[in-house]
Every structure is written in structure tokens, then in C-alpha cells.
Image (tube, rainbow, N blue to C red):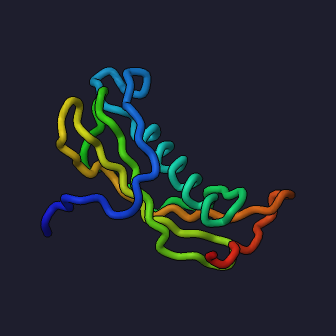
Amino acid sequence: MTEQTQPIGELTLRTLAMPADANAAGDIFGGWVMAQMDLSCGIRAAERARGRVVTAAVKEMAFAKPVKIGDTLCVYTHISHVGRTSITLKVEAWAQRYLSDLMERVTYADFVMVALDKEGHPTPVPAEI
């Protein structure tokens, strides 16, 4: 199997990995990367649902490569399925290495988001316009 060389999906978020996000060895915490992926899914799913969404599930996630201080984390999202109240997104996190054009995929996962009404109950996702 060959290594993926191009991101799949739409660039949804870019952010800089800073020292406060790292352990003593200079590796960025996996939880921080996952939080950025969750933010990206929230942005993309809320646009599609035209309203409030919450994270219902994150399917298997493994970290293939580390993110280092100074890298730009680029998160790509692709809506793979829209259910009655849920939206499933394929999410990829890529690191643009510090002061370089090199982009490497560091992790990916499927996130399931659920649309909510004003009272916080699941609500149908509107049809696409």
C-alpha cells in the first residue's frame, strides 16, 4: 500500500502547533490534534445542518506520525454520509512541516455529529439547498 500524498476533503482549519501544546520532547499532544479535528467537524457539520451540532462518536483513530512544535496543522473534512439527524465526516489531519512545503498525514478518523434543536434534542438535518 502506498502512502497517501494528497489530502482528501476540504481544508477546514489551519493552526500552528505551539510549545504549550507539546510534551517535554516537543511532540504535540494527540488530544490537542483530536480537538482541532473536532473543531473542524463542528464547523463543517454546522454549516451543513444550518444549526447547532455536537460530537456523538469518533471512530478508530491512530497517530501515524508526530506533530512537532512549529508545524502547521491542516485539517481536511469530507461529509461522507447524512442520516436523519446525523452527519458522518471523514477527517484527515496533515502537518505542514516547519519552514517547509512538506505535508504529511498524521492521523485520520470518522466523526459522527448530531444536529440539535434549540432545546438540545436531536433534530432532522435539512435537505441540501
Q: Residue furthest left?
A: 2
When the figure is inspected, residue 52 is found, relative to residue 85, above or below; the finding is: above
Q: How far across and down, in percent of the image, does residue 85 sit?
A: 69, 73
Q: Where is the N terminus found, in terms of image quarters?
A: bottom left
Residue 29 lies in quadrant: top left
**Nearest to the observer: residue 26 or residue 47:** 47
Q: Which residue is drawn at 71% across and 59% down?
A: 51
The picture places residue 67, in percent across and down from the top left corner, at 30, 37
Given the current orientation, which residue lies at the most extreme right position? 119
Q: Residue furthest front?
A: 129
User: As drawn, is 56 to the left or to the right of 75?
Assistant: right
Q: Which of 32 and 129 is in front in this view?
A: 129
Q: Is residue 100 above or below residue 124?
A: above
Q: In this view, does 120 lie to the left or right of 67?
A: right
Which residue: 40% across, 50% down? 75
Q: Residue at x 41, y 36 (%)?
A: 15
Q: State which quadrant residue 122 falls in.
A: bottom right
Foreground residue among 88 and 58: 88
Nearest to the observer: residue 51 or residue 23: 51
Residue 81 pos. (x, y %): 52, 76
Q: Residue at x 22, y 46 (%)?
A: 103
Image quadrant containing the C terminus: bottom right
The x, y position of residue 84, in whole percent, is 68, 78
Total marks drawn? 0
